[in-house]
Image (cartoon, grey):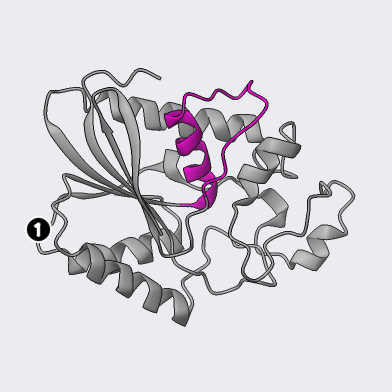
Amino acid sequence: MDLKNLEIDLFLIRHAQPENPPKHWTSPSSPLSNLGVEQAKQTAEELRLELFTDFIASPFVRTKQTATHIYNALEAKPEFTEQDWLAEIDLGVWAGKFKSEIEMDPSYPKLFPMNKVGRHEPLVARLLNTHKEFQFPQGESLQKFWERVSSGFLKFLNSKRDGKEHRIALIGHGGSFSIIQAVLLGKSFSDKHFPVMAINMGRYAHIRIFKERVVLLQLN
């Protein structure tokens, strides 16, 4: 990707733990659990002095709740906006169902054990490396999801080629962040291998884009 004229500190903040794992898959309306609220508050305390120029959340309930805790703690408050391109992949009819029920569905790809306790690598990252052709039943395909997130992210970056320094908070999901990470490393959907940089729920990665380079400064 073209990194010219970009001076950005990018914070990829993954939503805190939602109410229903580990036995269910989440839906767009899944709220934070009690633990998730505490995770969001901890991260809010860490980031309260950050001077963000942009503060953007996915429209899902768990991301907006995570973002609200962080935003309320900020001493300097930029505009708080929502962007649809940052939303997690559409799970279709599987959203909100028990994982054991989903695993019995004939269309379920036989991945290695999915999202067990203590396992943080995003499902989308695994699908990109093993079942790139997959589409969730009545939901989104991996390719459509890639196109949505990558095009939205690149359009957003292009709006920052103004010679100014930007400090950006994106509050999103493991899936959308897997694609953003891949795009920053110059990957395209046609590639065969994709990176897996797992951001724990409620935590963040701090990435600096400058002098046409991408540098990871902090992970979790």
Does the segment drawn in magenta span residue 8? no
> Could you tell me which quadrant the C terminus lies in?
bottom left
Residue at image mark 1: 76
Instruction: Tally the marks.
Output: 1
Identify the image quadrant of residue 127.
top right
Query: Looking at the picture, how far across and down is residue 169, in whole percent?
Result: 28, 49
- The span picked out in magenta is 173-197
Q: Residue at x 16, y 63 (%)?
A: 74
Could you tell me which quadrant the N terminus lies in? top left
Q: Is residue 176 above or below residue 26?
A: above
- Vertical placement of residue 23 versus 138, above or below: below
The image shows residue 3 at horizontal and vertical percentages of 31, 21
SS at mark 1 in the image: loop
Q: Is residue 140 left or right of residue 177?
A: right
**Residue type marked 1:** Ala
Residue at 42% x, 30% y is 184
